[in-house]
Image (cartoon, grey):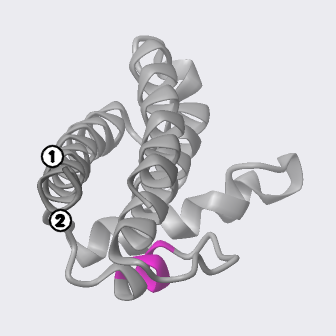
Amino acid sequence: MTEQAKAWLDRATEDLQALALLEKNPDLNRVAAFHAQQGLEKALKAAVVLKGSPIPRSHDLVRLAAVADPLPGKLEDNLLIELTSLYTESRYPADVGLLPGGIPSSAAVQRYHGALTQFIAEVGAAIARAGAAKERSHP
């Protein structure tokens, strides 16, 4: 269980690294926001696995957070809703005009980066605790 959760978290960390590179160029805010959504989705799926629940086939961050509840860290509902809305709308050229607030601002991308960084750290700590507990119970 912890190995699968760690694998999901490793992929979330890759999205975080991509976000960190992309946020340096405001012309790439849409793509940076997409990686924030993807990273958070994968980190939430790591939390779902850690809980022992099956992973829903969904990109809806609100739904994933509900399945993972209680979460190993804090996430604002409005952030989950905002990033979920960016998932499809930011991927295809015909939908770019449908973004609820237009292309995400640099401040929004920085907020996504901070929230993803913190949540990945919290899920990582939960995985480490679960691994240590498993080792203590099976010497």
Q: Residue at x 85, y 46 (%)?
A: 93
What amino acid is at disc 2?
Pro
Describe the element under mark 2 as helix, strand or loop. loop
Q: Is any part of residue 100 visible from this angle? A: no
What amino acid is at disc 1?
Ala
Q: Position of residue 109 (x, y in %)?
A: 36, 37
Is 64 included in the stretch rendered in magenta? yes
Q: Position of residue 58 (x, y in %)?
A: 65, 76
Please state which of residues 41 and 27 is positioned toward the viewer in this rendering: 41
Give the main secondary structure, helix, strand or loop, of the magenta stretch. helix
Q: Position of residue 51 (x, y in %)?
A: 34, 76
Q: Look at mark 1 in the image and give the residue it sits on.
A: 125
Q: Look at mark 2 in the image and give the residue it sits on.
A: 72
| First in residue order: circle 1 vs circle 2 | 2
* Labels in figure, total: 2
Q: Quadrant of residue 67?
A: bottom left
